[in-house]
Image (tube, helix red, strand yellow):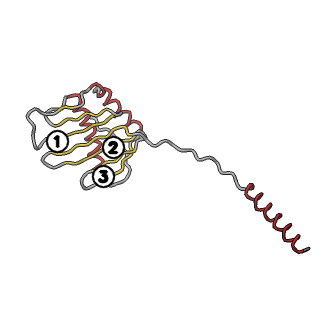
């Protein structure tokens, strides 16, 4: 009987130690979640005699993805580049444009463009593009071409003053 009391007492002490040891753990600092970057511009150009299928996605943190049929590249824009892009969209009053500009006569070799900026989507094609929208397309094509002409690494983009 005496041994049984020691076994019970030892079991109670062991159980108490195990229960208390769970309370002595190290506190971890709370994980702060950063918000995912938002898409600033999503630009696609397809078609034409060359059979283009290019896409440029720019995020509000300056990162961008350039892709074509044969290449995917990550680019990095600085704040000056982002400000310039926003200025081009503002100057052309992109938010006031219609959603669709297509040619009345059609054409199998026309390049089609799809531009999304702050959620507004505008589609157009060669020969039907309004002059103000052409400025946006020219700027996005410049960035797209620079991204496609480099190795898949981050690169700064500097504006070419015409």
Q: Position of residue 109 (x, y in %)?
A: 11, 44
Closer to us: 107 or 24: 24
Q: Which residue is mark 2?
A: 57
Give neighbour class at mark 1: few <14, some 14-19, many 20+ (Cα, 10 Å): some
Residue ID at (19%, 40%): 112
Quadrant location of the C terminus in the rendered image: top left
Residue that protrudes farthest toward the right in the picture: 2
Give the answer, above or below, for where 108 lies relative to 71.
Answer: above
Location of residue 104 (image quadrant): top left
Drawn side of residue 104 relative to residue 118, left or right: left
Q: CA distance from mark 1 to mark 3?
A: 23 Å
Q: Which residue is mark 3?
A: 150
Q: Which residue is mark 1?
A: 111
**Mark 2 and mark 3 in contact (Cβ < 8 Å)?**
no
**Mark 3 and mark 1 in contact (Cβ < 8 Å)?**
no
Residue ID at (29%, 38%): 160
Mark 1: secondary structure: strand
Mark 3: secondary structure: loop
Mark 2: secondary structure: strand
Give the answer, above or below, for where 7 lies relative to 52.
Answer: below
Drawn side of residue 92 relative to residue 25, left or right: left
Q: CA distance from mark 3 to mark 2?
A: 16 Å
Q: Position of residue 40 (x, y in %)?
A: 37, 37
Marks 1 and 3, the one that precedes in the sequence:
1
């Amino acid at each position: 009987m005496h041994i049984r009391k020691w076994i019970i007492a030892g079991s109670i002490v062991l159980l108490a130690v195990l229960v208390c040891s769970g309370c002595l753990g190290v506190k971890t600092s709370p994980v702060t979640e950063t918000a995912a970057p938002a898409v600033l511009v999503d630009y696609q150009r397809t078609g034409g005699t060359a059979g283009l299928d290019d896409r440029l996605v720019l995020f509000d943190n300056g990162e961008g993805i350039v892709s074509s049929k044969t290449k995917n590249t990550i680019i990095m824009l600085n704040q000056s580049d982002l400000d310039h892009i926003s200025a081009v969209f503002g100057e052309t009053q992109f938010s006031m444009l219609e959603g669709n500009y297509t040619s009345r006569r059609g054409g199998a070799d026309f390049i089609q463009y799809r531009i999304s900026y702050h959620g507004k989507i505008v589609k157009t094609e060669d020969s039907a593009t309004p002059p103000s929208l052409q400025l946006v397309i020219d700027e996005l094509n410049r960035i797209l071409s620079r991204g496609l002409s480099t190795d898949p690494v981050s690169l700064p983009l500097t504006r070419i003053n015409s």
